[in-house]
Amino acid sequence: MKRTKVVSALKGTDLGKEVNVKGWVRFHRTSKAVDFIAVNDGSTINNIQVVVSPSDFDPDTLKKITIGSCISVIGTLVKSKGKGQAYEIQCKSIEIYGLCPSDYPMQKKGQSFEYMRKYAHLRLRTNTFGAVFRIRHHLAMAIHKYFDEHGFYYFNTPLLTSSDAEGAGDMFQVTTLDIDHDKIKPGAEGKTDYSEDFFGKKVNLTVSGQLEGELGATALGAIYTFGPTFRAENSNTPRHLAEFWMIEPEIAFLDMTGLMDLEEDFIKFCVKYALDHCQDDLAFLNKMIDKGLLERLQSVLKEDFVRLPYTEGIKILEEAAKNGHHFDNPVSWGIDLASEHERYLVENHFKRPVIMTDYPKDIKAFYMKINEDDKTVQGTDVLFPQIGEIIGGSVREADYDKLLSEIHRRHIPMKDMWWYLDTRKYGSCPHAGFGLGFERLVLFITGMQNIRDVIPFPRTPKNVEF
Ligand code: 4AD
Ligand code: MG
């Protein structure tokens, strides 16, 4: 018999007919007259209620169907007489696929997220994580749809590279490991050769696909990447991961205004897409996790993002400090803004997203176009409520000599950069792009508080279980 997904059963598609639903038990209430079993199969946040007459079943078997068990139910889909659901299944037969012993770590409701992180392999079966990962999926689809519809090509950049795109040195180096399996047989002396390089070359995991993305944009016009990115920062914050997913569009002939327009339009499209495609999951998260979530998402759509030069932003922060607002990190022109500064601007001062522009060149990467003042660059960070920086982007330096002199000034090894410089040597063109941290977008849209809870298997310093 064909399986009916819970999401379609709950729409009453096969009303009055026999259906077969398969899934995991979320709840089982027993009484003399009737048993209620709530089943969820991951297709929706909602469960289907299965109504069982205990007299029709072996009582010992029925008792064993505890929370977490996996079952297949055949029964008639009927209108529910009870409150809380429109349809339910009048059970005819139950097949047990897998029982769930009482030490099931996800059995109790209301466990802390910290507790659940220890069970990343099982937390996926809870309501909250089901909602988060369905939303994450829809956002990934939204991203491809947006760029496809706007004429961007999906461009795949390498994960193994020999360059440091951000020049920050936060890279994981790749080591080749040669295990001789014949020699690991019992009794034999094992042989494992570690070599610090990749067949004679130093190679690291990519920190950003941007530089290769620029090669794509300066040939195909407009591209975007969407893939894993690795940062060896020892940052134990609710906003940092060692492995995260980044979306990096890169566009030929785009200037600063065009870049900011794209950043804003793209984020708004993603927020709107989630509101349109994830209504049940967002309603659940709004009720259980963050009561202000839906309102915040709606307000992002309505308001224009503030566009604020860094120098103006520093003045606002200095003024706030003068008026008694305490910052742990002192404010002055030239500092790299701390998250408390970014959040003050977004949450206290403007109360809406801010695109900050024209940062001091020394706190930004080597590839950003330098302004006429020779002090600031055409970089943009999009700062969001609850999150801080969600996007980093810039107009790129298109002038060969200026880019080369910046590479020298920063002592970036030239041997790593010759191919990048070729884009400026041969038919250079003005271009711009940005990077959006996918998990930070998912964090904002789900209202979750910790980035470890919006990626299925988080990697942070000292955490690579699973
Ligand atoms: O600001 P970042 O470092 O910029 C770049 O990598 C540029 N190459 C992007 C470009 O212009 N193509 O990173 C971009 C975004 C940040 O704004 C943030 O959202 C996210 O990536 N990000 C992280 N997310 C999670 N964990 C980390 N450790 C992150 N580091 C950056
Ligand atoms: Mg940044």
Image (spheres, grey):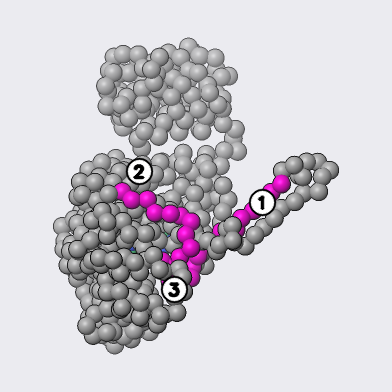
Secondary structure found at label 2:
helix
Amino acid found under the numbered disc labelled 3: Met
Residue at coordinates 50% horizontally, 27% vertically from top-left?
70
The correct choice, above or below, for 367 with respect to 21 in the image is below
Q: Can I make out residue 354 in this image?
A: no
State the residue position of label 2: 137
Amino acid found under the numbered disc labelled 2: His
Which is more foreground, mark 1 or mark 2? 1
Instruction: For ligand 1, tell me if the residue under mark 2 lies within 8 Å.
Output: no
Which numbered dot is residue 178?
1
Which is more foreground, mark 3 or mark 1? 3
Amino acid found under the numbered disc labelled 1: Asp
Disc 1 packing (10 Å; few <14; some 14–19; many ≥20): few
Assign the N terminus to one quadrant of the image: top left
Disc 3 packing (10 Å; few <14; some 14–19; many ≥20): few
Which numbered dot is residue 320?
none
Give the residues in magenta: 154-180
Q: Nearer the viewer, residue 58 or 327?
A: 327
Question: Sequence-wise, which precedes: disc 3 or disc 1?
Answer: 1
Q: Position of residue 196 (x, y in %)?
A: 62, 62
Q: Cβ–Cβ below 8 Å for labels 1 and 2?
A: no
The correct choice, above or below, for 173 with respect to 298 in the image is below
Q: Can I make out residue 453 in this image?
A: yes
Q: Position of residue 10 (x, y in %)?
A: 30, 27
User: Does residue 432 appear left or right of residue 201 in this picture?
Assistant: left
User: Does residue 164 appear left or right of residue 141 in this picture?
Assistant: right
Which numbered dot is residue 414?
3
Q: Position of residue 34 (x, y in %)?
A: 43, 20
